[in-house]
Amino acid sequence: MFLFQLYRVNSRFLNSVGIRNYSAPVNIKKTVFISQSKDIFTNLAFEDWMYKNWNFNNHHVLLMWQSDPCVVIGRHQNPFLEANIGELKNITKCGVSLARRNSGGGTVFHDHGNLNLSFLTTHENYNRRYNLEVISRAVSKEYGLNIEINKREDLVIGDYKVSGTASKLGRPNAYHHCTLLVNVNKEDLSCSLKKTNLNINTNATKSVRSKIMNLSEKIENISVENLMKTIGIEYMRTPAFQGKNKSIYANSPQGFKYVDPSEEQFPGISHSLELFTSWKWIHGKTPKFVIKYSIPLFPSFDCTSSDECIATLTVENGIICEIGLMLPHILNDLNIKNTVESVLQQSIFSLDTFCVIKEILDESVKNQVSVIT
């Protein structure tokens, strides 16, 4: 049985806020789920479970949650281009997790000052702008702050972005999820998303950097908890959108349900959780890329300034599958390429890969210098 608290929104309340009754043949139930977990992987797994198992034909859902500090990349992104991979564990007291979601779009940072919202419907009833209007309208009614929806369908205040948005469109179900910056730690966000200077060539989706703003910069004493209630009520009292006829039908509010996602309550969720926490998903789903290193030679080696070592690695599914080396002519007979391939071919790519190649080169050069002298 769910751990829940139910807020009923009756017809008298709907009439009081100007929502008229619709004499439509379909009456859509609407429920707001609030996850009590702050683990990003658990919440992504719960969202995935809902997407795969819930029947949204006559029952739409808004899922909301908060996350412990984490960077969440899109399904088709390269984490080495999007996140400060080498420093994530040092940014907060408990570190910053790296997660990959199952939708497209760009990279976002979560912490307890960020509200995550996922609108789940059938594909036919998917409407991103309609969902964003619920958020914008709720904030305007509660706090008197005007949040606009720009051409990219992001929520903005002037030139500043307050929400990132993405979606998963399948058959028969779909979801649109977004973040809402309430009082995120901007310093942690900036450090977590700091780009590493890597020479990578890829077709992976790249994030579009934007100026951001917390709602707390415009609204004093705003809280994520109150926003959940405010947006949840606005969602339930807003008539359901029906995509096929572009109509607005009556809805039957089912209230708020506070849940702690578990295998006992949602059989099969453990399989999704295992996937989202796996290396195979987080790194192994990285689109194919080619990375090039220019490697300085061991200082004792006598070479001209035009001599350089260039290593080119092709990485597919997170695994180094091809290695190319361009060496100064004097090193061509040292069997360096075979040594590098024997160590790195079919191994997992990481930020330490550069150091491994450099160590092999330095050791080879040392040995060559010893032979010459």
Image (spheres, rainbow, N blue to C red):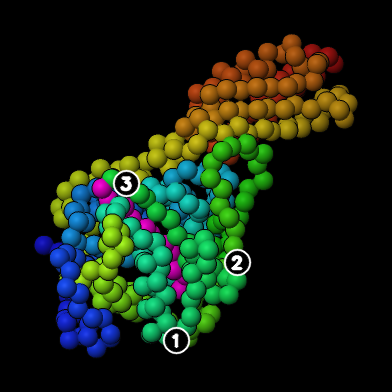
Rate crowding at label 2 as few (under 14), some (14 to 19) or many (20 or more) other CA atoms within 10 Å: few
Q: Nearer the viewer, mark 1 or mark 2?
A: 1
Q: Is residue 291 magenta?
A: no
Residue type indicated by callout 3 = Gly
The mark found on residue 265 in the picture is none
> Left or right of 136: which side holds 205?
right
Residue 321 image point, x, y percent: 53, 24
The residue under label 1 is which amino acid type?
Gly
Residue 352 in sight from this viewpoint:
no
Q: Secondary structure at mark 3?
A: loop
Q: 235 and 368: which one is in front?
A: 235
Crowd around label 3: few <14 · some 14–19 · many ≥20 (10 Å): few
**Residue that lies at the very extreme toward the bottom in this rendered image:** 16
Residue bearing the label numbered 1: 144
Q: Tell me what residue is drawn at x 65 percent, y 17 percent.
A: 337
Disc 1 vs disc 3: which is toward the camera? 3
Picture residue at 54% right of the left edge, 30% below the top: 315
Q: For mark 2, what is the residue? A: 211
Q: CA distance from mark 1 to mark 2?
A: 22 Å
